[in-house]
Image (tube, rainbow, N blue to C red):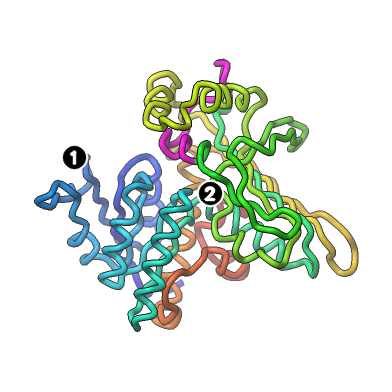
Amino acid sequence: MELFYTNVALIGYGRVGQAISSMLSQHGFQVTAYDAREIVGTTQLPKNQDGSIDYSVAVSKADCVITATPFTCNFDIAQECIRQSKAYFDLTEDVATTEAIVAAAETHAQQGNVVWVSPQCGLAPGAVGMIASHIVDTFEEIHDVKLRVGALPRSASNAMKYYLTWSSEGLVNEYINPCRIINEGVAREVPALDGYEILTIDGEEYEAFYTSGGVGSLLKKLEGKVKNVDYKTIRYKGHHSMMSFLLHDLGLRYKPDLAVELLNNGVPQTTNDVVVIYVEVTGRKNGVYKTETYHRKIYGDNKFTAIQRATAAGVCTVVHYWAVLGEVEMKRNGFVPCEDISEISLNHNPFWKVYAD
């Protein structure tokens, strides 16, 4: 499949960034990795006189930019991409950051400029929304849409039933910020860690609860068309009570930096992980009231962990879609949700195999 654009600037070379670079490079993309740190295999990003990071040169040399950085960096990078009319993709679950990026892109587009931004296109938000969107499109009447995702250690012996498999900053952020849902047809916000439930997947019991950002832009697509939509994080039973104690009883939700520090120093990292995805759509299909589900466990391989594979595959899928469309679709200006990718396009996308096999 011909790629109209292949030159990618990847900003942030952590574990997920490494997987993104490797996956794209294997499929015809030319990836240049940048980082603020001195890391072998990357170009170090320069700083401005005020000490802030200068992204302008990295952006100018690329067709598109992918950020695999902490969400606090994303808006500055997106602004530079918008200013230079370069396509922008990220993985963030942070709602406020995404809204700021989308607003800036839409303003730039309304002024007659070409811009493409697709934030929130990793795993959750990202791939899980695309999966749900395609199931929803097969129903004529939708009642409930449930999205459940967990990045879990394959085993854990501590009281939290959890080891770190990805960013502790992202983990704390989604555990403390308000969560957007649709309840009885009305969009509203609920507190993180609420909505506790027990669910069974392939005979194994898990717990799940609201966390922020995982539903991404799917909520806007479904507003006014569905009774209930929510996103919850999957964990092993017992994790929720421990996090509730730390964040609510001890008040660490008001001290996120301290919460991150405690997790980084007290909870070990693991590469022996599994990603659990469960999507359930209930409504009327061909006149029959029914439920359809998607459930899958993604494991690591000999190169990458499960969370690396699952997250990188999401953004690589969207970048490949953009690169194949070329000039025709680049006439679309502003915010392009990843849920806009058709199921036919996904079936021909080499990166979607992680979710489809």
Give the residue at x 63% y 53%.
188
- First reached walking from the N terminus: tag 1 or tag 2: 1
Residue 238: image quadrant is: top right
Task: Report which residue position mark 1 lands on.
Answer: 38
User: What numbered label is drawn on residue 213?
Assistant: 2
Magenta span main SS: loop
Tell me the kind of residue under disc 2.
Gly
Q: Is residue 29 magenta?
A: no
- Identify the element where label 2 is drawn: loop
Give the residue at x 86% y 69%.
286
User: Relative to 346, is 152 above or below?
Assistant: above
Give the residue at x 56% y 32%.
152
Tell me the kind of residue under disc 1.
Glu
Give the residue at x 43% y 83%.
328
**Left-right relation of 164 to 127:** left
Q: Is residue 163 magenta?
A: yes
Q: CA distance from mark 1 to mark 2?
A: 31 Å
The magenta stretch is 156-173
**Left-right relation of 54 to 278:** left
User: Relative to 156, is 46 above or below?
Assistant: below
Res 284 visible: yes
User: What numbered label is drawn on residue 305?
Assistant: none
User: Relative to 157, is 257 above or below?
Assistant: below
Residue 163 percent across, percent down from the top left: 50, 25
Residue 357 percent across, percent down from the top left: 62, 52
As rendered, which of 126 and 62 lies closer to the eye? 126
Residue 353 percent across, percent down from the top left: 56, 55
Q: Nearer the viewer, mark 1 or mark 2?
A: 2
As rendered, which of 29 and 205 lies closer to the eye? 205
